[in-house]
Image (tube, rainbow, N blue to C red):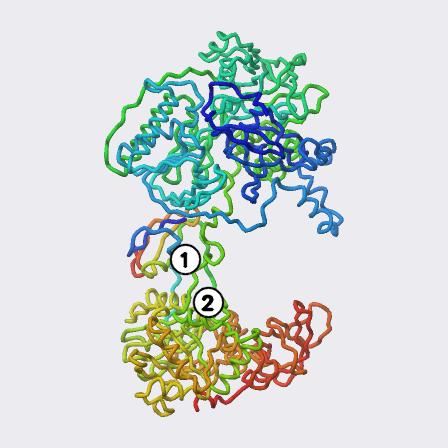
């Protein structure tokens, strides 16, 4: 079971959180012309990297905040956790 | 029965307390502190089971977790448990056990014929034999394999025992209470660290219980006792025996199984049978010790062949002799220690040492005691069927390839020692890159991935002095990192005998012309020739060899067989062992009961049960409940001898004719506040929200980004910046997460806050032509006329002193209202509605009537919004704005979603107007057609229309818009039904929606 540092609550066990997918995906802006390919990539296509992965987690049984986790998909090492608006 | 093999004045058992038990129907007795194994051996019983494949007689091989043979079926309190290791099961009064894998009994076992048919059972025989003919698989082969496979029989009864889970945090977790574990724990505890010390066995001390050493001025055993006593008194230390740390998971989470009642005749009233500990440790010290390796020779599986360390443990801990005429077969000094213990107790052993001329303190002592030692000798084969009677021995050449003249020697047991294998399971599970240590011919932990350190013999350190020194230091250093304290304890002096090098020899060659089976894996009956065959057939990877031969599988997970298997593969392949590598160690280290893993989360406790504040009223009024997500909801209210059909029909008819009331507390409710709520809702829902006035509700549909409908519901504008959203019962949690995702990540610039208020409000839906009459009487001071409270209107009212929110919304298609009050007032509101509604013939209705009402109105719900449908499919395309953008809009342009013959919801009526159509039925053109019959759609929801008094269903049908009036068939292979049907509009009742606005 992972030990995840919520940027608001600190270290908690994985069973307080829900996984939320790739955090590098950016939703196309509203009311913008989007090509089929671009939209298809946004909705369906996800990389499945071996190694570092930036992903969203949701502190669902805690503060209910979404945040970013940089995790190694092989070793499960967590390098850092960030608020959604933080880059470092 | 007399205990012929128990000797006086030695051992840690309590001779004042006799315990009687039963094995294979026969009565025996042992003493408090015995295991089932030690008590049986004391009684001279060595035949405990039959082997897996060949049904060869099986005895005892070890004295603890490493035991591959002595697996029994245990009977206790009318319960039965399979695969219990007799070497670990502590004796209790009335214990009953039976042998497994034998029929009709362990002495005369029909399956033993396999032993003589062995040429038909080589490695991989399953894969070769059971391939053809194909039709034989289900009827012949599979039942045969199932009957032959496995050892014990699992109970099919409900397990009445209680199991618990516990979460714990500590600075240091120490797995094993041998000298290394005790030293680490003591040093860390003295340095202020929070320590958990876990010992699998009932007794603390590990090897100190059986070895002849001194620490300080005490014997090893006394030192261990004193350290444990001191640790138990310290407030920062948890000391647990009968507790196996069996799994090492991510981020230093370890799981431990504590056995609280398995050694007792009955669980204590307030104590569970077992407790599973989830331990998050800052540092882990692995002090799991080592397991003696077998030597491989002919018939080395015969009962009476035991590990030499086990023979010593039976003697020193239990006062039990594994034999009175022991042969010790060793390649190292450990065998001598066992021989010396035998001699001290008046038994004359013979030692066969594979080495030609070893020299050490222990060997000198054995020589001084006059023990008969034969150097450069090996056991070629054990003789005897159900028990060792003698052995064939021979001198072996210096290169270990040639045997001399075969001699016979009488003996009743053979104690083998092939040196020691560090127990690296936990380290390996943690991700440690293990390395091969040529000095000890075994793998030891290498580079750590997590915060773990292995100490003592688990780390390949086999002298006590070195073990204590490094373990004290490890405990001190690791605790210092955490506590920043620097309290050192002095390292005691050690008196132990010096040992010399072991011999790398492990497998005795076969004498010419002999075909003795030489066992590598005792639990799975894997012999040397099986592995050789697998390699000849092209299996190279050790993982493949394992699966093909079953080497190292099953309940003992190769604790005694792994390394010899690797040695063999490396010999045949001419590789060094590290190049062969080892198979992956996976948790659990020892079998764990399913009960312990599940814990208290059984039956109704497997998920929380949510009840509405009106639940007690429902119970008192004969409600029959149904699970709705995690909620319990009334399905119908039973009157007299009504069933589901009659009751729900009565309730639905009463709504259409008079008025009904339904508990809708379970609907998801989300309170939304902020200046940007309208803009947010406009992006979340498919329809327009910017102009919703205060005091009005609106129905909305929300999509996922892929265009599929996620949920529907109404949202009401309570005041300028305050909205109340409802969701379906099932999707409430997902919708909240969805909204939070967009507010926190995608559009953080929107000033909006959301919070779940599902449990804060109790809700009642009042529906039917007379609902306004009820409402008017509930709120005499409020104008609830069609003008005062129009369809989709919202008011706040005073319900006999209780604040209430009144929404004019309808799911039933009738004139209807929903009244919400604070949860605490829910029951008050409900009783008032029932009381006031009496004169209008009000009746409560449950979810079944609710479904009937919405189905015949063609209102879509969960069975249509099934995660595969878009708004068009549900007839909701009118709610999809063409002007504005919203979540999922772009996906609606996909060609599949705009196809001319796109599926759409329709109504379905059986032609005979009598036969109900099972939900899930397929709609097809031809009743009888070549399979697979092309499917045009499926029936999503069915009811008995109370308006027309005939069955009616909703279906999702390809090209639904052009299918009205078509005649099709509804097929339900499950119910074996073929029903001719007509497709009609999904809006079966009141298609213009006049009633809700009346």
| Residue at which label 1 appears | A19
Does residue B65 show up? no
Drawn side of residue B377 relative to residue B426, left or right: right
- Which quadrant of the rendered structure holds the N terminus of chain B? top right
Q: Nearer the viewer, mark 1 or mark 2?
A: 2
Instruction: Tell me residue B91's x, y (percent).
Output: 51, 33
Q: Nearer the viewer, residue B287 or A33?
A: B287
Q: Quadrant of residue B826?
A: bottom left
Q: Quadrant of the C terminus of chain B?
A: bottom left
Residue drawn at x 71%, y 46% is B141
Q: Position of residue B44 (x, y in %)?
A: 60, 24
Instruction: Give me the chain letter of mark 2.
Output: B
Toward the viewer: B412 or B691? B412
Residue B368 placement, left or right of B151: left
Separation (CA) of disc 1 from disc 2? 28 Å
Task: Name the residue beneath numbered marker 2.
Answer: B632
B286 displayed left or right of B639: left
Q: Categorize mark 2 by other alpha carbons within 10 Å: few (<14), some (14-19), many (20+).
A: some
């Amino acid at each position: 079971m992972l030990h995840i540092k919520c940027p608001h609550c600190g270290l908690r066990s994985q069973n307080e959180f829900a996984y939320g997918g790739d955090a590098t995906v950016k939703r196309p802006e509203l009311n913008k012309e989007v090509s089929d390919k671009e939209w298809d990539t946004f909705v369906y296509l996800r990389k499945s990297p071996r190694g570092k992965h930036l992903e969203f987690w949701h502190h669902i049984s805690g503060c209910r905040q979404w945040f970013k986790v940089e995790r190694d998909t092989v070793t499960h090492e967590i390098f850092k956790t960030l608020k959604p608006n933080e880059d470092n | 029965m007399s205990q012929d093999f128990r000797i006086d004045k030695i051992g840690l058992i309590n001779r004042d307390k006799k315990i009687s038990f039963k094995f294979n129907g026969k009565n025996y007795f042992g003493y408090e502190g015995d295991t089932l194994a030690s008590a049986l051996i004391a009684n001279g019983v060595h035949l405990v089971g039959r082997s897996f494949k060949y049904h060869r007689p099986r005895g005892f091989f070890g004295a603890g977790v490493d035991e591959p043979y002595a697996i029994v079926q245990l009977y206790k309190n009318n319960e039965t448990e399979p695969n219990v290791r007799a070497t670990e099961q502590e004796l209790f009064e009335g214990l009953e056990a039976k042998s497994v894998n034998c029929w009709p009994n362990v002495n005369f076992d029909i399956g033993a014929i396999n032993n003589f048919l062995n040429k038909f059972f080589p490695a991989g025989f399953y894969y070769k034999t059971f391939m053809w003919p194909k039709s034989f698989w289900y009827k012949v082969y599979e039942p045969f394999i199932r009957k032959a496979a496995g050892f014990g029989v699992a109970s099919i009864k409900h397990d009445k025992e209680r199991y618990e889970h516990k979460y714990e945090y500590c600075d240091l977790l120490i797995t094993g209470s041998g000298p290394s574990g005790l030293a680490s724990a003591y040093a860390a505890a003295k340095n202020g660290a929070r320590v958990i010390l876990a010992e699998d066995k009932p007794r603390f001390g590990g090897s100190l219980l059986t070895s002849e050493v001194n620490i300080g001025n005490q014997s090893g055993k006394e030192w261990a006792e004193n350290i444990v006593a001191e640790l138990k008194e310290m407030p920062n230390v948890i000391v647990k025996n009968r507790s196996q740390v069996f799994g090492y998971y991510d981020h230093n989470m370890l799981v431990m199984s504590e056995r609280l009642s398995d050694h007792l005749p009955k669980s204590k009233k307030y104590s569970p049978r077992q407790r599973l500990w989830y331990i998050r440790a800052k540092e882990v010290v692995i002090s799991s010790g080592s397991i003696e390796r077998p030597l491989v020779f002919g018939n080395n599986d015969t009962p009476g062949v035991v590990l030499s360390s086990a023979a010593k443990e039976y003697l020193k801990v239990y006062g039990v002799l594994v034999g009175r005429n022991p042969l010790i077969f060793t390649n190292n000094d450990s065998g001598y220690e066992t021989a010396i213990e035998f001699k001290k107790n008046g038994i004359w052993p013979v030692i066969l040492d594979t080495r030609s001329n070893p020299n050490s303190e222990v060997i000198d002592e054995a020589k001084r005691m006059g023990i008969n030692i034969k150097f450069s000798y090996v056991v070629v084969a054990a003789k005897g069927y159900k028990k060792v009677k003698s052995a064939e021995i021979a001198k072996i050449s210096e290169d270990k390839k040639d045997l001399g003249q075969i001699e016979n020697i009488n003996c009743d047991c053979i104690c083998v020692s092939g040196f020691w294998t560090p127990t690296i399971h936990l380290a390996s599970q943690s991700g440690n890159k293990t390395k091969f240590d040529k000095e000890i011919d075994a793998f030891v932990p290498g580079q750590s991935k997590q915060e773990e350190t292995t100490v003592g013999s688990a780390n390949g350190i086999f002298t006590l002095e070195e073990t204590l020194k490094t373990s004290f230091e490890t405990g001190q250093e690791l605790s210092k990192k955490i506590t920043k304290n620097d309290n050192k304890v002095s390292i005691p002096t050690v008196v132990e005998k010096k040992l010399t090098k072991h011999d790398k020899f492990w497998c005795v060659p076969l004498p010419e012309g002999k075909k003795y089976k030489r066992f590598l894996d005792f639990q799975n009956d894997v012999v040397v020739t099986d592995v050789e065959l697998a390699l000849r057939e092209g299996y190279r990877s050790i993982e493949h060899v394992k699966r093909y031969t079953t080497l190292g599988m099953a309940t003992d997970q190769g604790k005694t067989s792994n390394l010899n298997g690797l040695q063999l593969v490396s010999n045949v392949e001419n590789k060094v062992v590290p190049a062969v590598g080892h198979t992956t160690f996976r948790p659990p280290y020892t079998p764990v009961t399913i009960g312990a893993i599940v814990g208290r989360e059984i039956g109704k406790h497997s998920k929380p049960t949510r009840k509405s504040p009106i639940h007690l009223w429902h119970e008192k009024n004969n409600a029959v409940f149904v699970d709705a997500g995690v909620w319990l909801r009334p399905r119908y209210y039973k009157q007299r001898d009504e069933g589901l059909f009659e009751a729900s029909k009565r309730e639905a008819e009463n709504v259409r004719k008079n008025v009904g009331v339904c508990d809708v507390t379970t609907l998801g409710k989300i309170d939304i506040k902020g200046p940007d709520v309208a803009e947010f809702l406009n992006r979340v829902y498919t329809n327009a929200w910017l102009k919703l006035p205060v005091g009005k509700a609106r129905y909305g549909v929300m999509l996922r980004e892929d265009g599929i409908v996620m949920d529907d519901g109404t949202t009401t504008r309570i005041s300028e910046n305050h909205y109340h959203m409802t969701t379906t019962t099932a999707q409430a949690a997902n919708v909240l997460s969805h909204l939070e995702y967009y507010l926190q990540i995608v559009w953080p610039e929107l000033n909006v806050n959301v919070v779940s208020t599902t449990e804060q409000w109790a809700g009642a839906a009042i529906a039917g032509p007379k609902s306004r009459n009820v409402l008017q009487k509930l709120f005499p001071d409020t104008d609830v006329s069609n003008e005062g409270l129009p369809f989709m209107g919202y008011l706040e009212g005073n319900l006999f002193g209780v604040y209430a929110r009144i929404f004019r919304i309808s799911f039933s298609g009738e004139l209807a209202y929903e009244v919400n009050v604070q949860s605490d007032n829910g029951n008050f509101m409900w009783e008032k509605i029932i009381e006031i509604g009496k004169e209008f013939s009000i009746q409560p209705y449950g979810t079944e009537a609710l479904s009937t009402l919405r189905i015949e109105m063609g209102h879509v719900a969960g069975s249509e919004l099934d995660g595969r449908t878009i708004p068009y499919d549900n007839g909701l395309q009118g709610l999809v704005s063409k002007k504005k953008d919203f979540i999922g809009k772009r996906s609606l342009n996909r060609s599949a979603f705009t196809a001319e013959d796109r599926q759409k919801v329709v109504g379905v009526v059986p032609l005979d107007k009598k036969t109900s159509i099972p939900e899930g039925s397929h709609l097809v053109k031809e009743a009888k057609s070549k399979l697979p019959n092309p499917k045009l759609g499926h029936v999503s929801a069915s009811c008995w229309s109370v308006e027309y008094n005939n069955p009616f269903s909703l279906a999702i049908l390809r090209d639904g818009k052009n299918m009205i009036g078509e005649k099709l068939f509804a097929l339900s292979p499950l119910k074996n039904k073929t029903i001719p049907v007509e497709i009609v509009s999904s809006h079966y009742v009141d298609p213009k929606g006049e009633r809700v606005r009346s």
